Structure formats: structure tokens, C-alpha cells
Amino acid sequence: MSVDAVSFESFCSRFATEKDCVLALYQAKWPNGFCCPRCRHPYAYVISTRRLPLYECQACKSQTSLISGTLMEGSRTQLRLWFQAIYLHTRPAGINALQLSRIIGVTYKTAWLICHKIRHAMSLTERDQLLSGIVSLSDAVYCDRPVPSLEWHKQEQPLIIGASGEPTGKVVRIKIKKQNKVPLKNRYDCPDQEIFIRENIDPTAQVRRIVKRRIGRQRNLALVRLCLDAESFLGHTFRGIGPKHLQVYLDQYCYIWNRHKQAVFSELLQACATTRTITYPQLTGSTLIRSSRPKRQYKVGSSLAG
Ligand SMILES: [Zn+2]
């Protein structure tokens, strides 16, 4: 049975031991079989005297561990707890570090780090998947005040949302990006959309710019509502997020939304197995989303193009 559709209890039974997880992580990391990270040779000797297996390349003799080059590199947390954390991050409601620390029995700091690392893998996955086909754009405001003004409130963050959809208008994929908070010139001022278009939309897409404006009446309510849903998710699960880490939490929301609330453990495990880890200083500094994975681009919904 697929592990994507089971309860948490069944999932824990399926991955009850480190041995269970080693095999699954091996397959996620090397889906086509072992590949030496140094010389690409396909065969290795397995050294099983450590907590986790070590692989010695039969050609160049270099050794690599199972978690080397993955999100778990350097972690002493058991794989089965990592697996549980990854599974719990695929749930539509998400999970915060305090909840995770209680469920898998680790310290809050360890849980916090695991959550951020998994979120990092989600964020990179979302970065690589461009909007395509028919794409609608709108701006929106995170923590929008009921009575907006030309002055930005410190809690407010300008956003741009892009949504690709079917000809019927049904939205199938979204991206929400935080924008720089620049002074508003007038009531119709809105963020520059060019950077968003360049970085997030396939060049062949048909882009419909719907400019809601900060205070103007021309709102795309469907897109604004999606941003409100994201804000509600962040408020409910994380008790609100400040501007520093807002983007990766928005990426997490979009990652789950874009999978239409279907559990995606296998996909997320593969992302964690192919994403280089991110350190505590990187997470707490300003280099949060430096690329640690080769940039790949997929066309999603390309059949809608034109
Ligand atoms: Zn080698």
C-alpha cells in the first residue's frame, strides 16, 4: 500500500525501525541505484558497522554515507523520527515545532531545526516549478488592515500572487511572493510585477495582469481570498509569521496547496534526500534561500499554453 494514503499510526508501523527507513531513503536518494558522488561509478561496497550504512565506491574508493548530501546530513536524530516529521509536514494543517517536538519526542530546538529544513526543501521544490499556461496575477497584502491607508502598518507585507488555471477558470497552481515594502505613491500604487513574472512564470505562459491596487476597487477576489487562506493557515498553525521568514512559510503553504491537499510523503522524502542541508546560521541569518540544489525547471500545466 502507498505510504501517501495511510494514517500516522500506520505510517509509524510501516517505518518502525531504522532499517525500514534506510531502504526507503536509499531509494529516494539513488532511485536508479548507487551513484558515486565523486566519479559517478555505479557500484559500491556497503560498510554496515556504523549507525547508518557507509558506501565505498568500487572505482575511486571514496566513501559516502547515506545521509551525506541530504537534508539530514550532520543530524544525529534517528531516521524514523525524520520520516515522521516529513510525513507530518505533508498534512494540510501543517505542523509547528512545538507540536512536532511533542509528537516525535525531541527537544524544541531540534524540532525547530527539522521543521525549517523540511520547509527549505519544500521552498526549493516550489522554486523549480514555474507557473505556465494561463496565469493570472494580483497583488495582495498579508495582515491587511480593515481600513487601509497610504502608510504601511509594520505588520502588513505586500504580496503578489500568481495562479495558473484551466480554461474554465479553476485554479490549479499558485505562487505567493512577498514584495519589498516601498512607500506608496498614491492609492493606485502596486508592487512591480516584472520580477515576479521573470522568476516564477514560464516565458510561454499567457499572463493576465489583474491589478488590484492597494486601495482601489478593482480586486480579483478569488486571488485575494487565496492569500487570506494562506494568512489564516499561518495564523492557525504558527500563530502568525514575521516578515523575516514569511516567504518560506508562504512557500510551504503553496507546496501543500499545489498538491491539492493530497499527502505527498514520497515526493517530499525525495526532495529531502536530494537537497543539501541548511545550517542553523544560514537559517537565522540573511542567506535563508541560497540555492543548495541545482536549479531545475518543470513545466506544469503546459497543455494550457496558448
Ligand atoms: Zn567513485
Image: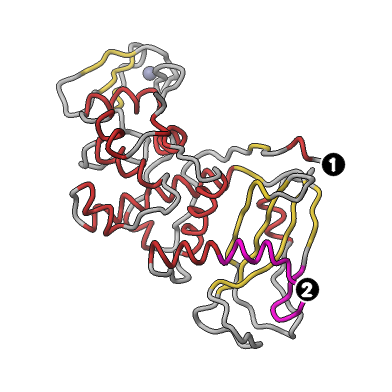
* Distance in Å between CA atoms under marks 2 and 1: 26 Å
Circle number at residue 218? 2
Residue 145, position as x, y percentages in the image: 57, 82
Q: Is residue 261 left or right of residue 117?
A: right
Say what secondary structure mark 2 lies in.
loop
Q: Residue 300 or 62: which is nearer the viewer?
A: 300
Residue count near mark 2 (Cα–Cα under 10 Å), binned few <14, some 14–19, many ≥20: few
In this view, 63 is above or below 102: above
Residue count near mark 1 (Cα–Cα under 10 Å), binned few <14, some 14–19, many ≥20: few
Looking at the rendering, the quadrant in which ligand 1 lies is: top left
Q: Residue furthest left?
A: 49
Residue at position x 68%, y 83% from top? 184
Q: Residue 219 or 119: which is nearer the viewer?
A: 219
Residue 215 is a magenta residue: yes
| Res. 37 in view | no
In the picture, residue 229 is in which quadrant? bottom right
Look at the image and tell me in which quarter the C terminus lies.
top right
| Res. 105 in view | yes
Residue at position x 30%, y 17% from top? 61
Residue at position x 36%, y 41% from top? 87
| First in residue order: circle 2 vs circle 1 | 2
Residue 198, position as x, y percentages in the image: 71, 53
Which segment is the magenta one?
A: 211-228
Residue at position x 42%, y 34% from top? 5
- Residue marked by disc 1: 306
Look at the image and tell me in which quarter the N terminus lies.
top left
Residue 17 is a magenta residue: no
